[in-house]
Amino acid sequence: DAAAARGALLVDAESIADDAASWRQLSYYRNGRAVPDEAGVWAAHLPTTAAVLDAIRASGAAAALPKGSMEFSLLAPGARLRAHCGPSNHRLRLHLPVVVPPCPERACALRVGDEARAWREGEVLVFDDSFDHEAWVDERAVGERVVLMVDVWHPELSLDDRAEIRAHFRWSQ
């Protein structure tokens, strides 16, 4: 089971970590598409989480969302994700911290624009990832930071706006 779970983890799938091995992701949806659960990790170990993510998509909040992801993001002590930004402001990104290792204030944090916030277990951070952002976990942290990351449609977009955005991303692929 543990070997299957490790095999299902992507290592720095976006090439933005200072040390690629320090950032891993367990993806349920990636780039708007379901990721096959070939190792059976979601079905065997995370069925409730999978059901909640499916319900979010079915609700319309993330249905047919181009470039949308739903995944666990694991950052090791000493990890830093370099400043980067999403493809457009058509989505908002939610970070639900599941595990935040003990570390000094803002030594395990996310910066969006000019504002840095520390993750706190059970408190969702919502941000527009089209803004420049970066994340880090201090090397003194005891253990990995685990966040459930969920992308949803920007709430100010109408259904017509969403259809236009989907058409754009289909055309640009």
Image: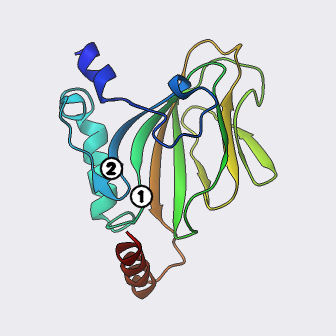
Q: Residue at x 31, y 60 (%)?
A: 57
Q: Position of residue 108 (x, y in %)?
A: 69, 28
The N terminus, quarter of image = top left
Q: Residue at x 27, y 42 (%)?
A: 50
The answer to which image quadrant residue 132 occupies is: bottom right
Question: Residue 166's mark?
Answer: none
Mark 2 and mark 1 lie on one chain; the one further toward the N terminus is 2
Q: Residues within 10 Å of mark 2 (few under 14, many from 20)?
A: many
The answer to which image quadrant residue 18 occupies is: top right
Q: Is 88 displayed left or right of 160 in the figure?
A: right
Instruction: Determine whether 26 is above or below 155 in the image.
Output: above
- Residue position for label 2: 29
Q: Position of residue 121 (x, y in %)?
A: 57, 31
The C terminus, quarter of image = bottom left
Q: CA distance from mark 2 to mark 1?
A: 7 Å
Q: Looking at the image, which residue sits at the far right?
A: 114
The residue nearer to you, when weighing 19 against 60, is 19
Q: Residues within 10 Å of mark 1 (few under 14, many from 20)?
A: many
Circle 2: residue type: Tyr
- Residue position for label 1: 68
> Do the residues bearing badges 2 and 1 touch, measured as CB atoms within 8 Å?
yes
Instruction: Determine whether 58 is above or below 157 in the image.
Output: above
Q: Is 138 displayed left or right of 69 in the figure?
A: right
Circle 1: residue type: Gly
